[in-house]
Amino acid sequence: MEKQVILNAKHLELTLKRLCHELIESHNDFSNTVIVGLQPRGIHVVERLKIILEDILKKEITCGNLDITFYRDDFRRRETPLLPSVTNIDFSLENKDVILVDDVLFTGRTIRSGLDAVLSFGRPKSVELMVLIDRRFRRDLPIEANYVGKAVDTLLSERVSVEWKEHEGEDKILLYTKESDE
Amino acid sequence: MNSLSVEHLIGIRDLTKEDLDLIFKTADSFKQVINRPIKKVPSLRDITIANLFFENSTRTKLSFELAEKRLSADIINFSASGSSVKKGETLVDTVNNILSMKVDLVVMRHPSPGAASFLSKNVDAKVVNAGDGTHEHPTQALLDAYSIREKLGSLKGKKIVIVGDILHSRVALSNIYCLQKLGAEVMVCGPKTLIPKNIEELNVKVSNNLKEALEWCDVANMLRIQLERQDVKYFPSLREYSMTFGLNKEILDSLSKKIVVMHPGPINRGVEITSDVADSDQSIILQQVENGVAIRMAVIYLLAAQIER
């Protein structure tokens, strides 16, 4: 199993802070902005962003979790149906500036489903995309992120895994190559 | 486990505990969906569903239709009155004719027990049983159990009494299988003539005394007296039935604990349950209807996932 660290804990922390400052640059005091994390892994990024943003802005940031299982375009194309996770958006997205957040941007299909799902909660004023890792040149759809933690060049057979202190024991982002059976 | 162990939903009897948990977990997500501003998901865009109702139904038919529409499936409806069934066409012929219009899944209610199972062996489509005679009504049992789970947290160790016309009830049979698989204890209660012989073999308690049964239980599921299926008189009069086995506020308030009251509908107010009980805060009758849509969405979603492209 070949693995390589893309970002370690220290760099991940720096990257998250930079992303937060980029967000504040374009969203000022977040008065009309909400952050929506995509299930299952994007929500962990949102948890961190929320802490950092609230610390800088000294106010509460509205955040939600969005599950996109029922909006996917690969229903019946997989061996087994995907199990849905929890959606937790108890506010309307009507006329809001929405920032969709995921950990890794790969083919863009998840984001496409996410855009569909977002519309079920109202018509947002704008939607932006933030990802921690952008696997460049691997898109199936014309989708790009507005805010990128780090762009990496990867092979199709490789896998990027974002791990968190709270869930996996350590903050780090890894790149697994071929022989990995995980 | 991410998929059902069965290819059709004929009865609860065929399902495993894991199947039930999977259906409930999926239904949780669909319940969120139907409470959104836009209550629809695109999952079943390329699926066509036929609703075949050879027997009258309002609630179940509406609930299935709504569930299918919320999943974005295309649907066709068929009811026996005004169809070629009256002209002597057999069940398989009727259904095959409909299937040649490229239908992927059939939801069927039929007055004959075993009709759904027969159909599933003879046609090339997924079959969901929406009630076959006095045999099973699986989606009703699923939504009943789901509603109890929502109200009381879990089914394990809970005591549920099913009161009324057990003999003619497909709801009772499906409920017994479903509740027992989820670890609940079941009792049936009603006049001796309406309790099937040897029902003890299903591991259920039997009582002929309503008060005693209600004292024992956490949840009472009051069934309708199915006059349309009763070929002979099973009890002297509806008035007498109502006095002996009807649930009224007086009995409910005399119990030592607050029980949950359910009814699969349609209610005969004043017969098996009085209006003040049906509309009381102990009743979860309307929650059952809401959960019915979520459960049916879950069942159809999980079965449709198995359809080959």
Image: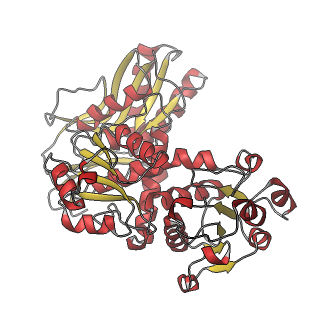
Percent position (x, y) of residue A21?
Answer: 43, 22
Res B303 quadrant in image: bottom left
Q: Is residue A45 left or right of residue A91?
A: left
Q: How many marks?
A: 0
Q: Residue at x 23, y 26 (%)?
A: A144
**B201 or B132, which is in the foreground?**
B132
Q: Quadrant of the N terminus of chain B?
A: bottom left
Q: Residue at x 57, y 60 (%)?
A: B227
Percent position (x, y) of residue A64?
Answer: 49, 34
**A4 or B123, which is in the foreground?**
B123
Q: Is residue A171 left or right of residue B97?
A: right
**A37 or B296, which is in the foreground?**
B296
**A151 or B153, which is in the foreground?**
B153
> Is there any visible trace of residue B277 in the rendered image?
yes
> Is there any visible trace of residue A158 in the rendered image?
no
Q: Residue at x 56, y 70 (%)?
A: B232
Res B117 quadrant in image: bottom left
- A70, above or below A80, in the image: above
Q: How is the image coloured?
A: secondary structure
Res B113 quadrant in image: bottom left
Percent position (x, y) of residue A171?
Answer: 41, 48
Percent position (x, y) of residue B290?
Answer: 53, 44
